[in-house]
């Protein structure tokens, strides 16, 4: 939860589109007006910007070349500290982030081809 629940600037990142650019198109049409969906934190040689590609559980997908999108927020004052509790999250941001991610899932569901072998 802490990866999408604490951002007072109303910014949520969709990361790893640098590695999987074909997954960007469905995100471009999302209609959330409350959260600014940004792309980034995935370019290995971009100076001054932290690369999140290997910074969490999703790195296993990348290592296995399984396309994915990681949704997250930049570090905040409580990030990975004992104060990173439910009481300190931005509850309305969290709800809006979940809604945006659900909208993204629906967009991918409409966009990705169905494998006829199943």
Image: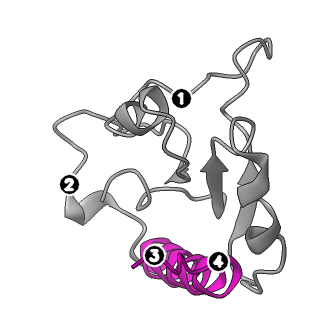
Residues at badges 1 and 2 in contact (C-beta under 8 Å)? Answer: no
The chief SS type of the magenta part is helix
Quadrant into which the N terminus falls: bottom left
Determine the CA span between mark 1 and mark 4: 25 Å
Disc 3 designates what residue?
Answer: 117
Residue 78 vs 42, above or below: the answer is below
At 35% from the left and 37% from the top, the residue drawn is 79
Residue 86's disc number: none
Disc 1 designates what residue?
Answer: 53
Which residue occupies the extreme left position in the image? 82
The answer to which of marks 3 and 2 sits earlier in the sequence is 2
At 56% from the left and 53% from the top, the residue drawn is 69
Disc 2 designates what residue?
Answer: 85
Determine the CA span between mark 4 and mark 2: 39 Å
Query: In the displayed structure, does residue 23 sit left or right of residue 85?
Result: right
The answer to which of marks 1 and 4 sits earlier in the sequence is 1
Residues at badges 1 and 4 in contact (C-beta under 8 Å)? Answer: no
Location of residue 8 in the rendering, given as x and y in whole percent from the top left corner: 57, 59
Foreground pick, 1 / 24: 24
Disc 4 designates what residue?
Answer: 113
Q: Nearer the viewer, mark 1 or mark 4?
A: 4
Location of residue 72 in the rendering, given as x and y in whole percent from the top left corner: 51, 50
Residues at badges 4 and 3 in contact (C-beta under 8 Å)? Answer: no
Determine the CA span between mark 3 and mark 1: 31 Å
């Amino acid at each position: 939860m802490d990866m999408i629940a604490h951002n007072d600037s109303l910014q949520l990142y969709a990361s790893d589109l640098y590695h999987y650019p074909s997954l960007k198109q469905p995100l471009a049409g999302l209609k959330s007006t409350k959260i600014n969906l940004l792309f980034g934190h995935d370019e290995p040689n971009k100076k001054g910007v932290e690369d999140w590609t290997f910074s969490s559980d999703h790195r296993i997908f990348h290592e296995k070349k399984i396309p994915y999108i990681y949704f997250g927020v930049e570090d905040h004052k409580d990030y990975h500290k004992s104060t990173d509790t439910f009481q300190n999250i931005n509850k309305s941001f969290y709800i809006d982030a979940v809604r945006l991610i659900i909208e993204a899932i629906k967009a991918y569901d409409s966009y990705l081809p169905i494998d006829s072998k199943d």
